Amino acid sequence: MGLDTCVLLSPKMKLVIVESPTKAKTLQKFLGEGYEVLSSKGHLVDLPKKNLGVDVEHDFTPEYDQVPGKKEVITELKKAAAKAEEIFLATDPDREGEAIAWHIKQLIGDHKTKRVAFHEITEEAVKESFLAPREINQQLVDSQQARRVLDRLVGYKLSPLLWKKVRYGLSAGRVQSVAVRLVVDREKERQAFHPEEYWEILAKLSDSGDFEAKLLEKDGVKIAIGSQEDSDRIAAELKKEEYLVSRAEKSERRRHPYPPYTTSTLQQAGVNVLGFSGKRTMRAAQALYEAGLITYHRTDSTVIGEKALEQIRNFIGKNYGSNYLPADAIRYKTKVRLAQEAHEAIRPTKVELTGEKLDVSGDEKKVYELVWRQTVASQMLPAVYEQVSADIQAGSYLFRATGSKLIFDGWERLNRGEEARSLPELKEGEKLKLLELVPSQHFTEPLARYTEATLIKKLEEEGIGRPSTYAPIISTIQDRGYVSKEGRALKPEDAGGIVNDKILVPYFTDVVDLSFTAKMEEGFDEIARGEKNWVELIRGFYGPFSQELEKAEESIDKSSMTTIAETDEKCPDSGHPLVIKLGRYGRFYSCTGFPECKYARPYIEKIGMSCPDCKEGEVIIKKTRRGKNFYGCSRYPDCKFASWKDPRPSKPETPSETPSP
Ligand SMILES: [Zn+2]
Ligand SMILES: [Zn+2]
């Protein structure tokens, strides 16, 4: 045997590199011998922590540093790469994954590397992708790089301004600032809202059974009752009238299933159904994806692949019967930003695997079941209701009663349906007996505060969020103390209001402008499609931005920045009026004679409850050093009571605005 043949016969090792150890384990199972799967354990390089790391003078070239603690991983990867016959970079199938692959390629040397991408970690999908490896897509890398650099420029340039003018430790981010603005503006709308009184009158009527009807019209015109006097007068008239069924109609109504989940709708359902934050839902989804149980969880597509559709339809036919199966598969319309990324909705990889058969953690099981139900339900027939509507004439007044009855549950067999409201069989011309009139007082209500779910929905509608950004945006604005949660509702904190109203809106119009931010996001998409140069996008932003920055530096007067409200109180030391200001640890009273007069005292926000620990102090709202609210005892440091949760006995939570799927 010659030397040459000997080399040919030696074992050929193929190296596969992914970004997570769990994913590596799942992959190794499918690829078997001949492949070594290693993990980079996240990013290997990133922009530096301590300085800007972007050369604004030279085409915004990013200066990447090795991520601390990654030395060993890099050595291991390099060693394995040197021995490998072929190298496959199998990072996640999106722009961030493409960028990680690109960085790995540069670190281990520019040879023999191929890119493979798959949207589910199943044997079939993985093997298919290895049959068709490709080169790294530089457009996707550039798009990711542009986002990273732009976010870095905004964050690193704005934050020091906020430290100087408002409070040390504050920070501003590009998309986050728009999210804060939405929350701040909603709060202003709510404060400016004047509730108006109105009255409703229900009639309890009797036929073959009792039912309720609502007063709707007088003389054919919609009725508006604004006061108790009016309500009493109308009720007195109504008592004397005869009640006749003037119209009774039955109709059939279909409730269609929802499309399968995208990242945005999955996170909304996580909030509404499970009470999970977006971050928590995504953590569970990530684990499920890496274990090969669901398709990639960062997607804005509602498409289900043809093979999966067939499996889902078979499953429905076998388990629920063919009467639950539409004649054809249902194909949901989806917005495609980019052909390379036009992957699938979030769905289980094996539909036969129901939640109870899974051996995973609690959160993962719950999220899996959400995904499973939504996917299967999305391919089932609509639910059918019999809808009954009846008009009841009482003199010149008109009441309406409605009822509905489920005839066929369809997809609602898997997901919560509507509550049925029964109505007796009513015939036109029939006379009814009035049992009781029930007037009730109401007030018009302002728009509800955003919840995490409705804010994600809004960001998506405005074209501001992307599958990879919803959860980080929402958690960042809370971590930074700009927004806090009351139950499920998001409300602005003082720091959020000040930074938005006094700095960002007046001085950085574009940064907090919804359509401008949406345009930047589109710009990233254009870069990914190869229609735009990333440096030009950044340059177009950075020129005006640095001018705004200079102007803000010069014109913002620090002393007026942190004043939240004036008071009627006079300073006990100097007699000057006192104001409420925002300090390092929240609000405090300050003398307008400052700096000559140093009088100040803490602003204590009581919640009207004595301390559950010591029973002597009062529970007050306090702030952490990072500006996050918590509940503490007024006797601190004698009493150490502290809680993130509102200790008051269960306050009603804000009902969600989105229908829970
Ligand atoms: Zn004073
Ligand atoms: Zn206490």
Image: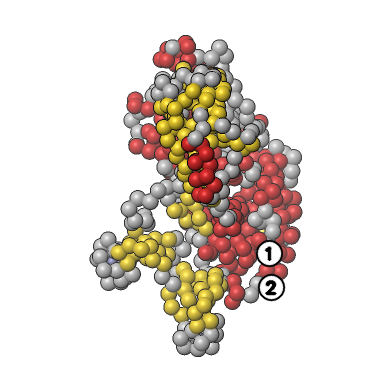
- Viewer-proximal residue among 4 and 306: 306
Judge whether 177 appears above or below 127 on screen.
below
Residue with the mark numbered 2? 555
Query: Element type at marker 1?
Result: helix
Residue 49 at x, y percent in the picture: 53, 59
Residue drawn at (59%, 76%) of the image: 559
The answer to the question of whether label 1 and label 2 lie on touching residues, with beta carbons closer than 8 A, is: yes
Q: Is residue 139 visible?
A: no
In the picture, measured across the screen, residue 340 lies left or right of residue 88, that is right
- Farthest front residue? 240
In the picture, measured across the screen, residue 53 lies left or right of residue 33, that is right
Residue 482 at x, y percent in the picture: 52, 59
At label 2, the amino acid type is: Ser
Disc 1/disc 2 C-alpha distance (Å): 9 Å
Judge whether 644 appears above or below 206 on screen.
below
- Viewer-proximal residue among 191 and 280: 191
Quarter containing ligand 2?
bottom left
Residue 19 at x, y percent in the picture: 49, 40
Residue drawn at (52%, 64%) of the image: 494
Judge whether 179 appears above or below 292 on screen.
below
Give the number of marks.
Answer: 2
Residue drawn at (38%, 66%) of the image: 606
Judge whether 172 appears above or below 579 on screen.
above
- Farthest left residue? 614
| Residue at mark 2: C-beta within 8 A of ligand 1 | no
- In which quadrant of the rendered view does residue 416 lie? top left
**Dot 1 crowding, Cα within 10 Å, few <14, some 14–19, many 20+:** many
At label 1, the amino acid type is: Tyr
Residue with the mark numbered 1? 507
In the picture, measured across the screen, residue 506 lies left or right of residue 642, that is right
- Viewer-proximal residue among 274 and 589: 589
Residue drawn at (42%, 65%) of the image: 623
